[in-house]
Amino acid sequence: MNDDQRPVFLERHTYRRRRMKDAATLLPLLGAALISIPLLWLGEARTANVMLYLFGVWVLLAVLSALISRHLHTDDASDAEKDPQDVSDP
Amino acid sequence: MTILNVLILVCLSYVVFLFAVAFAADRAARMGRGAWLRSPVVYTLSLSIYCTAWTFYGAVGFAARSGLEYLTIYLGPSLVMIGWWWMLRKMVRIGRSQRITSIADMISSRFGKSNLLAVFVTVIAVIGTTPYIALQLQSVTLSINAFAQADPAGGGGMPNTQSTAFVIAMGLALFTIVFGTRNLDVNERHHGVVIAIAVEAVVKLFALLAVGVFVVWGLSDGIGSTLDRIDASSIATWDVSGSRWVGLTMLSAAAFLCLPRMFQVMVVENQDERHLRTASWAFPVYLMLISLFVVPIAAIGLELLPSNSNPDLFVLTLPLTAGQDELAILSFLGGFSSATSMVIVAAIALSTMVSNHIVMPVWLRLTGGTAVVSGDVRTVVLRARRLSIAAIVFLGYLYFRVSGGGAALAEIGLISFAGVAQFLPVLLGGLFWRGATRVGAVTGLSVGSLLWLYCLFLPSFGPGVILPQYVFDQGLFGLSWLRPYALFGAQGMDKVVHAVMWSMSLNALSFIVMSLASFPKPVERLQGAQFVNVFEHSRTGGTWTGGLAQSEDLLVMSQRILGAPQAQALFSKAARAQGLGGFLPEPSPDFLQTLERELSGSVGAATAHAMISQIAGGTAVSVKDLLAVADETAQIMEYSSRLEAKSAEQARTARQLREVNEKLTQISVQKDAFLSQVSHELRTPMTSIRAFSEILRDAKGLTSEDKAKYSSIIHDEALRLTRLLDDLLDLSVLESGQIAMNSQTGLLSETLDRAVAATGGATEGFAILRAPEDEQILLTTDLDRLSQVFINLIANARKYCDAEAPELRIRTKRENGMLIVDFVDNGLGIPIDHQSLIFEKFARVGETKAGGAGLGLAICREIMTRLGGGVSYIPGQGGAAFRVTLPDVQALAAQ
């Protein structure tokens, strides 16, 4: 009954926000993968280079998180409804 | 003036400044002016209590020992923050909707408000946090000692380490008590404390960045040369243990979620869920900045300072040896801020847990109930909290004294992390798995914390202190597979990773297995549904059964906890919502639930639950609640069933309206028909009267015979008109019920005699057959009206009976408590299609020889209805048959 009422295709902003939710869920996984990569360079790389890489990843993750979070509203538990605020978002 | 004295002066003024900031913020919040207190920036900064003195001093020491590995401690929480959408958001939402006061409260709430679990979590948290508090005290005393050592004019020698630590502990306890237990707030929010730690967050970040900038551009020659010097140092090679890299990242992520102090600022003090959005990127940036200069400081420190100097204090000793006293003091303030903010928040979080889950239940049991005790529970709660704070800080001090401040800072921090990380399986399971049960949670926590104690915490004191040396060598009871650092034969692992691996995996395993094997209680299932599906229905669970609860007792109890004005306001608001006046609402389930939530904000969910159940008698899970447990779509089902009920009601109303409308239409038609009938009936006699009176007036030469004939016609028609009008009047009076019935007592036979006589009696052409012996019945009713009915019926028979030898039989009998008088003639009777009409006004059957207005039977029916009986046509009697019924109470057999 519930499934029948859900639209199959979504209006553009709602669609965008859903994908942002997916991105928000996947971002920590991406982060975990990125900070594990230096383990492949064990014994070869220099501390200074790995440090630069890790801080670069850190900044990248923060920027991505900021970009994604801008599109997420904490109070939209139900997916289908349209948030009027969303219209003003770029 | 020595640098040590300057340091103490600066430190004291800094403390006074913090007190002032906290006081001003508290004041502003109380007066409702502090919108800036609730900004996302303040929230993000308050999260920085994650960075304690362990970070400020210890990170550099960590880096000096094992290179980049220290980053794991900050990368883990960063990952948690950027993954806020699926974990932190849920925790914060649940924390708000269930009024959670601590991590122990959250876990106990989730598993059926079990106080056992709450006590368990509290004890583990206290054990895990005490060393950490000791660590903070140690770092402050160490840093003061570093100043004393560096002080060239240090005539006073080394300050007493123990007394320094004691003074600091006292000061921290005082600050925490003053600002942490000022209000027994519904939401446990401490604006003063939050602002103070936000300020301290800025100070420590600024101090660390300042030292870093000094090291990179002051002691070294910019970024390029610093990187070269890192390359030349002993930590130049990227060489970490893979298991430690992954394990510590996961451990710090877990601890970030589970540390009582983090839970306090992240969930309990959260003002607005949207703040998480800002913190999701701002806090990782903060952590990144905090750890940015750690490796340069460590590398330069290793290079410049003598090899026997403590790397944990490089942040302080580098500026000191370079003669930068101001920078050193700033750095000291940073470390001091890190240490104090951690101790303050940890003490608040732990004291809430201790007082809500240990002191209050014990106190409640000792005093034997809430409704009967005297005194103010509020003061008891506050006192319990203050004592708990003092006790926790003192415990930390005690640990510091006993351990002697030996172990490296990073070690204690990791041990503490591993202890609180034991909450993670239960927390995650509770938030995402509805099948998690209380039994599973207790088992998992027990297994995990026992392993942590045995594999990490107790051995950390060193061989021979708590665990004897032979346990390390041969294992417990001489079983080699029980060696604390090589459990189940897991040799050669790092001891932290070893302990975390075994404790967490067995914790999770036993939690899952026992959850699968046990069956939850209804309250657990309900809370489980509410936690896991918090975004679908943010309602609270556990309906109270009212009735037994006494509103007055509840008010007395609430006043003691919430304070009299707040409690009275709450109660009178509830009473108004129920449509009652005064202060005492009905103890409805809704009200009890609201009250429980209010109380749980002050004393924790389990205690509030226990307090109300002492007065209200107990909870019941209603069918409606069970629906929520049983089915994900409970909400929809409830909604649709409500819709169904509503539409059924509307259908009923519509049907009623239709019926009324039909009746109205019929009545309108009847009225029209009646009016046309009346005018028709009046018109016929009027026409003849007019015609004959015109003849009399205009025609000449009428014989007196004609005149008499015409006059008598006019007279007859006038009589008929009069009769018609009389009947109409009679009927309308009867119908409107304005007529009064004169009750008389007489024999039925006499009434019948009168009626027969009035209609001309039995004649030769019309026989009336009666049974006089049956008619000896004494009646008490309006006999005149009754005889009017009889007359009508007899006259009708006389008029309409078309038999050769017409006769009327009058039979009387008593049946089923009714007196029945039948009038049956031997004519053709009334055709079936007319039988339903004969009692209507102006109803006349066919073209009959005798003229009548057709009102007689209608009048009869009205009269009989008024007398409490009725008149009806009975078919199949061999002629027209009318039955008059009267209730028997009015009839008595004649004596």
Image: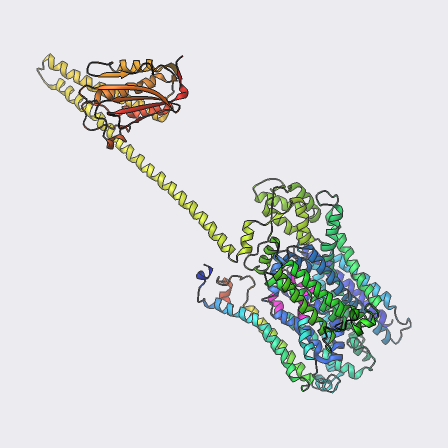
Quarter location, residue B649: top left
Magenta-colored stretch includes residue B259:
yes
Return the residue found at the far left.
B701
Residue B432 shown in magenta: no
Magenta stretch in the rendered image = B252-281
What is the x, y in percent for residue B229?
Answer: 73, 86
Q: Position of residue B466 (x, y in %)?
A: 82, 67
**How many numbered marks does the figure carry?**
0
**What is the residue that sits farthest to the right in this orientation?**
B155
**B658 displayed left or right of B806:** right
Name the one closer to the observer, B359 or B157.
B359
Could you tell me if residue B260 is visible in this image?
Answer: no
> Quick check: B780 above or below B230?
above
Apparent side of residue A50 relative to residue B382 in the rendered image (left or right)? left
Q: Based on the displayed image, in which of its 4 quarters is residue B497 positioned? A: bottom right
Q: Quadrant of the N terminus of chain B?
A: bottom right
Q: Position of residue B887 (x, y in %)?
A: 39, 23
The answer to whether any part of residue B787 appears in the image is yes
Residue toward you, B823 or B292: B823
Q: Main secondary structure of the magenta part?
A: helix
- Image position of B469 with respect to B237: above or below: above
- Quarter of the image with the C terminus of chain B is top left
Position of B760 with respect to B652 (left or right) is left
Residue at image location 11% in from the left, 15% down from the top? B706
- Asked which colour scheme the image uses, the reply is rainbow
Q: Position of residue B493 (x, y in %)?
A: 72, 77
